[in-house]
């Protein structure tokens, strides 16, 4: 869930990912627990919601087949790919 980086002073720090940010928006306690990997087991409802999200992702990949999938990259690689200029204008 975490990606780490060294700042200018050489201190190793954690990135605040989109998932962690969204946890903090829902509930500050959720951010605290999720950042320490102390979340409880997922309920059947939550498992179902995640399955729906994966199905939706498959659907979107079919709709935007020429898109770039950043899901398998770590945070640093994701930023490098995301910041490259587009090859064509839409």
Image: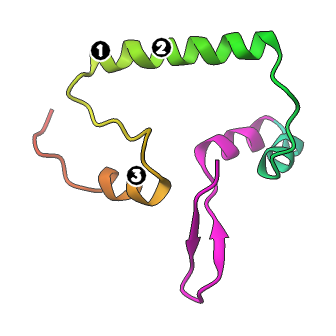
**Reading the chain from its start, which is encountered first: label 2 or label 1?**
2
Looking at the rendered structure, the secondary structure element under dot 1 is helix
- State the CA–CA distance, disc 1 to disc 3: 21 Å
Horizontal relation, residue 16 to residue 31: left or right: left
Tell me residue 60's x, y (percent): 37, 17
Residue at left offset 68%, top offset 39%? 22
For numbered disc 3, what is the local secondary structure?
Answer: helix
Question: Foreground: 86 or 6?
Answer: 6
Residue at the image position 45 percent from the left and 20 percent from the top: 57
Look at the image and give the residue range highlighted in magenta. 1-26
| Residue 81, above or below 62 | below
User: Which residue corresponds to mark 2?
Assistant: 56
Position in image of residue 53 (x %, y %): 56, 17
Q: Of 57 and 29, which appears nearest the observer?
A: 57
Q: Residue at x 24, y 22 (%)?
A: 65
Q: Quadrant of the C terminus?
A: top left
Q: Quadrant of residue 77?
A: bottom left
Mark 1 sits on what residue?
A: 62
Q: Are marks 2 and 1 in contact (CB under 8 Å)?
A: no
Q: Is residue 4 above or below residue 63?
A: below
Which mark sits nearer the N-terminus, 1 or 3?
1
How packed mark 2 is, by other alpha carbons closer than 10 Å (few <14, some 14-19, many 20 or more), is few
Q: Is residue 48 above or below residue 68?
A: above
Q: Earlier in the sequence, mark 2 or mark 3?
A: 2
* Callout 3 crowding tier (Cα within 10 Å): few <14, some 14–19, many ≥20: some
Label 3: which residue?
78
């Amino acid at each position: 869930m975490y990606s780490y980086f060294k700042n200018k002073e050489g201190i190793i720090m954690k990135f605040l990912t989109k998932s962690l940010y969204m946890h903090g928006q829902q509930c500050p306690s959720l951010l605290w627990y999720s950042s320490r990997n102390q979340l409880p087991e997922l309920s059947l409802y939550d498992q179902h919601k995640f399955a729906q999200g994966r199905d939706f992702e498959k659907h979107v990949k079919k709709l935007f087949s020429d898109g770039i999938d950043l899901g398998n990259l770590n945070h640093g690689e994701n930023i490098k790919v995301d910041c490259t200029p587009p090859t064509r204008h839409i």
